[in-house]
Image (cartoon, grey):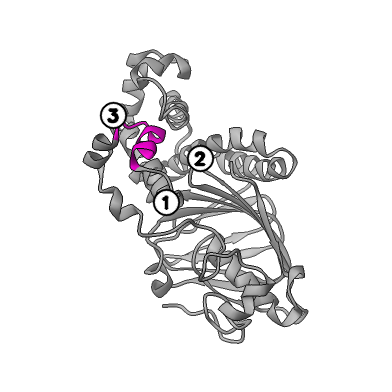
Amino acid sequence: MEEPSSWSTEDVAAPDAFGYWSDVICDTLVQVAARATGEAPFAGRLEHAALDGVGLSTIASGPQEVARTKRLIARDPEEYLLVNVQPSGRSLAQQDGRTAALESGTMTVLDSSRPYRLQFAGAFSQVILRVPRTLLPARVAAGGTAVALDGRGPGRLVAEFLAGLARQQREDPEVAAALLPHAVGLLETALGWAARGTTPTSAALSRERIRRFVRQHLAGPALDAGAAGCGLSRRSVYRALAEGGESLTALTRRLRVARARRLLRDRPDLPVAAIAAQSGFGGAAQLHRAFAPSRARHRGPTGPTGPEGQPISSRTISRNRGGGGGCGLSTNAPAATS
């Protein structure tokens, strides 16, 4: 996991606070339009770290409204599921005509490829897991859209795990890095259960173990021989995946392509051969057969940076946005809806 970064409105003058905050959430999470809604001076803090394209952020902030609009979606080529866990305060999430009311111990899942709106009436904290849709099977990734998972059943387990993972990130980043892949597997399982409205089966639990193992060993030896690492026979591996509608070959290719795309975008200094090796491909030629790497390198490294690539700070905020409110919008204007 990358070294955690943190940003606070304490680092800038009060008139620039919300503009600075808006820049940070746009560049660290996804592009949104935001406005402060409280009467008191705005204050916020964000801590963020990422591993293999999966981001883990912790936010503590004052009241605000946030909108992900069609115009802003068009700026983001990447698509994510955003898992918002609410340790404190209350919020309202709206997407695709569905509304999820969050309070302490609950969470919702949003799809970054479609418009949504978030409302925070007072001070709050959230833990946000940002998962590229390419890391999840299509049938699971499609189950976002303001799905509220309450304080019971699998939703509670996932919420508690993510809240604990955020605490662990502050205390021991290395341990958090080892645990982060489990968060993706838990999310995948919980969304699958929520979509079906059923209790977990042994095959579903096996698929979660298999996918976690594959993610952790993409660049390792032949995965066919890795069934023992999942505690399963080869036959059980293939049967469990087949019940979920995906073969081991398709799963492996999907995750390798996802990793290669992230490395191409985030590490423009790496040659294609090195990216192929780190992603588990047999070489650059095999990677080229899977997809066109040149198209994935049109974006530079992700993260909060200014127009010349410098980290966002109190020195760049006034030049970039003029103290405005979020992706170039005024703090006094209502969050846009299209």
Q: Is 331 located above or below residue 288 in the figure?
A: below
User: Which residue is the extreme one toward the bottom?
Assistant: 332
Image position, residue 191 (x, y; %): 46, 44
Q: How far apart are marks 1 and 2 (CA)?
A: 26 Å
Image position, residue 198 (x, y; %): 45, 37
Q: Is 150 located above or below residue 256 in the figure?
A: below
Q: Is 86 located above or below residue 26 in the figure?
A: above
Q: Is residue 287 left or right of residue 19?
A: left
Q: Residue 168 appears in which quarter of the rendering?
A: top right
Q: Which amino acid does label 1 sit on?
A: Pro
Between disc 2 and disc 3, the foreground one is 3
- Camera sees residue 232: yes
Magenta-highlighted residues: 272-283
Judging by the rendered image, the residue that carries numbered circle 1 is 268
Between disc 1 and disc 2, the foreground one is 1
Disc 3 to disc 1: CB gap under 8 Å: no
Q: Distance between the residues labelled 3 and 1?
A: 28 Å
Q: Which residue is drawn at 54% across and 60% down?
A: 29
Q: Which of marks 2 and 3 is nearer the N terminus?
A: 2
Q: In this view, does 196 lie to the left or right of 164?
A: left
Q: How far apart are marks 2 and 3 (CA)?
A: 20 Å
Q: Which amino acid does label 2 sit on?
A: Val
Q: Which of marks 3 and 1 is nearer the N terminus?
A: 3
Q: Residue at x 59, y 32 (%)?
A: 178
Judging by the rendered image, the residue that carries numbered circle 3 is 249
Which label number is shown at residue 184? Answer: 2
Q: Is mark 2 on a helix, strand or loop?
A: helix
Image position, residue 84 (x, y; %): 58, 54
Which label number is shown at residue 224? Answer: none
Q: Which amino acid does label 3 sit on?
A: Thr
User: Which residue is the extreme one toward the left?
Assistant: 289
Disc 1 crowd rating (10 Å Cα; few below 14, some 14-19, many 20+) is some
